[in-house]
Image (cartoon, helix red, strand yellow):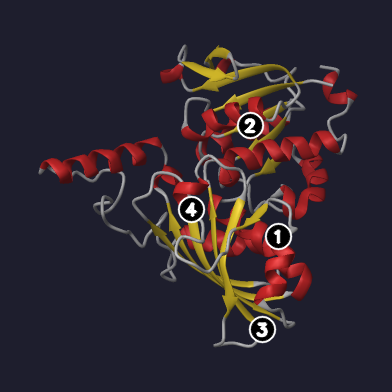
Amino acid sequence: MAYKVAVVGATGNVGREMLDILAERRFPVSEVVALASSRSIGQEVSFGDKILKCRHLDTYDFTDTDICLMSAGGDVSREWSPRIGAKGCVVIDNSSAFRMDPDVPLIVPEVNAAAVAGFTRKYIIANPNCSTAQLVVALKPLHDAAKITRVVVSTYQSVSGAGKEAMDELFSQTRAVFTSGAVESKKFPKRMAFNVIPQIDVFMEDGFTKEEWKMAAETKKILDPKIKLVATCVRVPVFIGHSEAVNIEFENPISPEEATEILRSAPGVLVVDKREPGGYITPHEAAGEDATYVSRIRADHTVDNGLMLWCVADNLRKGAALNAVQIAEALMNRKLLGPKMRAA
């Protein structure tokens, strides 16, 4: 069976990755439609060896479309996802608009793929925050083995997580530093080039940022509501790839050696941990890859049953586009897209 797939936000960083990954993984499509806002109508994007011209979201009829990969921001998703779902088209949404909706599954296929069956309540499935996605892929097998009670995570997040304009700003600022030009900050609250910024998203009343809140709330919904998690999220001058330093406390004992063996056999995880100079993964190596990489697995001797690890992934792929396509594959593999949807 082949599916008609629409990609909303096809000209953006994640939208383009979605198109690439659909082609790379040979997702069975009868047709792929690229959709965008009015300013991008007619703009061309690639899908495998084909060139697609963007069509207008406002005038597109989703009646005969099976899957919509939505990557156009929260405001667009809040307006359009319920309308698209009402047409019998499953929306896989990359924004934060519906992540905490109790009637919308929040899915990382390596962690909770079975929960996709809940899509029928609203015909919407949420993709988690990019920093959450890679984290729970690494946490899930360890939680199954020794039961995680608490996580402390510090993130080192690339500028691509803030969109193409953020990548352009880092590039222009870096060039300006080397040419003694004016360093202008528009996308970020402070200079990004050769700097780090301990703020991602807006501040909340308790002093945490919304990104930090998202990591805690989404991990609870995806993995286990009993897990306590606290995060410090930092933007770093890297174009692609999020990194995380993770401290984990467990209810039961688990050694670094046991954790390493568990992670080596876990879906979606690659362990690179040679305990020598360069024997770990950085965002540079993870860019363009599908895996969640784990390195520097070691005991945390300051707490009982504690481990520390380093986690890296391509935020445009596993943190967004790849995860969305994997959700579509989970729907397909579980035969949840049946004849009723094809009847249109």
What is the distance, in whole Å, between disc 2 and disc 3 at their CAs? Answer: 40 Å
What distance separates the C-alpha of mark 3 from that of mark 1?
Answer: 20 Å
Q: How far apart are labels 4 and 3 at the CA level?
A: 26 Å
What residue type is disc 4 on? Answer: His
Q: Which of marks 4 and 3 is nearer the N terminus?
A: 4
Give the Cα separation between the discs numbered 4 and 1: 20 Å
User: Is residue 141 shown above or below 292?
Assistant: below
Quadrant of the image containing the N terminus? top right
Going from N to C along the chain, the mark reached first, 2 or 4, is: 2
Left or right: 280, with 100 as reference point? left
Q: Which mark is nearer the camera, 2 or 3? A: 3
Query: Disc 1 marks which residue?
Result: 264
Residue under label 4:
242
Pointer 2: what residue?
69
Q: Which mark is residue 305?
A: 3
Instruction: Name the residue: 65% across, 25% down.
Output: 23
Which quadrant is the C terminus positioned in?
Answer: top right
Outermost residue to the left: 180
